[in-house]
Image (cartoon, grey):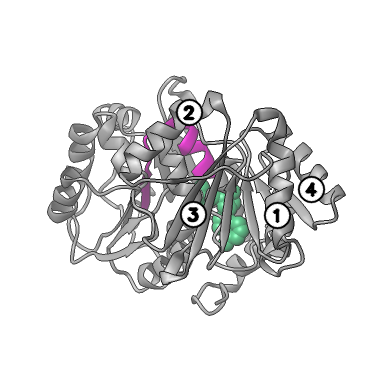
Amino acid sequence: MTFETLGLAPALLRALDEQGYTQPTPIQEQAIPLALEGHDLLAGAQTGTGKTAAFGLPLIQYLATTPQEVQRGAPRRPRALVLTPTRELAVQVHDSLRGYGKYLRIPSTTIYGGVGMGNQLDALRRGVDLVIACPGRLIDHLERRSVDLSGIEILVLDEADRMLDMGFLPSIKRILAKLPKQNRQTLLFSATFPESIKQLAMEFMHHPREVQVTPQNTVAETIAHRVHPVDTARKRELLLHLLAQDARVQTLVFAKTKHGSDKLATFIEKAGIQTAAIHGNKSQGQRMRALSDFKAGKVKVLVATDIAARGIDIDQLPRVINFDLPMVAEDYVHRIGRTGRNGSAGEAISLVAQDEAKLLRAIVRMLNRDMDIRDVPGF
Ligand code: AMP
């Protein structure tokens, strides 16, 4: 699947190519065609899955290709609104969308609290097509009538579950009441779908299509969970021992820190196993290269931190090794969610030192499943 086959315009394809996006992520593959067709969308996707482009690309394409119906002499009104829970996310989404739309002219602004009103008022007065806003400050603008939302054609709720967790439901409802009811497309992205979100969707969306890539808090039944107790000082040796047993098995190794994953990758590489590392200090290009080498089998072992591994999608990964246990039990599920997909067998191996016993107990509790705890002879 390519971005071209998803139906995106050449100006967007060019921008994506420059950013090094070669292939759509699963959520993009599912969401983009439906959004381009004009459907409302309920999308289950968490950060790291490429969700921003999943709503951003169709949104920009719509703005660039559909002329606005304007009455002569009337001021320019925003046509698309993206609501985000935090100002950091608003800025991040804005940056991403500006990158995707760099060959198109889509005037846009962010609106969030904690800063002066001046710049936001100027931008709104000059006229923008796209507003990326946090609910609280947007309400302030509505109250002082500095923004007119009656021309919104596309609404995106990004990280809807987090917005509700932060108590934004009343604000969201007030904002929704200011939007046109007819001829509006609504795209709702959320990592989880509690009852409150379903209700919101029922009230404000029109026959939404559902797409889903978020792994729920379950892991495939086909995965064997193994724990090897080991002294911290001998973890590296044990890891190498396990990898060397069959060096052909593609293995994703999780480490706690960026520095730790670099050191570990170098250590494995020195032992003659092709290895790459991905973490937050690597550039997007380096990460993409490491990932594609791993997918292509050129690299047998990929060492990753939790953050860096979010959103990487590898089908049929046979083995995940936790060199360090994750600090939060949910991350175990995210890590292991990469193996045993589609009914294939997978192995999840954790090297657990004495000081990690508490983390292990939390994981076992969450999985509600016993793990096979086994000493490796010699360790
Ligand atoms: P998001 O889930 O939207 O926060 O995106 C996570 C990261 O993946 C961001 O750094 C994006 O720039 C990047 N990204 C999104 N889609 C793609 C893609 N198709 N190819 C490569 N990188 C992508």
Name the mark nearer the viewer: 1 or 4: 1
Residue type at numbered disc 1: Leu
Residue type at tag 4: Ile
| Residue at position x 13%, y 49% in the image | 199
Q: Find numbered disc 1 in the image and state the secondary structure of the residue it sits on.
A: helix
What residue is pinned by disc 1?
A: 243
Q: CA distance from mark 1 to mark 3?
A: 29 Å
Q: Secondary structure at mark 2?
A: helix
Cα–Cα gap, marks 1 and 4 = 9 Å
Residue designated by label 2:
357
Q: Give the labeled residue for mark 4.
A: 268
Q: Residue at x 56, y 63 (%)?
A: 317
Residue identifier under label 3: 49
Q: Residues within 10 Å of mark 2 (few under 14, many from 20)?
A: few
Number of numbered discs overlaid on the protein picture: 4
Magenta segment: 80-94
Q: Earlier in the sequence, mark 2 or mark 1?
A: 1
Q: Amino acid at mark 3?
A: Thr
Would residue 136 be counted in the magenta stretch?
Answer: no
| Residue 127 drawn above or below residue 215 | above
Q: Quadrant of residue 236?
A: top right
Q: Are marks 1 and 4 in contact (CB under 8 Å)?
A: yes
How far, Cα to Cα, is label 2 from label 4?
26 Å
Q: Determine whether the residue tagged by mark 3 lies in a helix, strand or loop.
A: loop
- In space, the residues marked 4 and 3 are separated at their CA atoms by 28 Å
Residue 229 appears left or right of 33: right
Where residue 304 sits, quadrant-wise, is top right
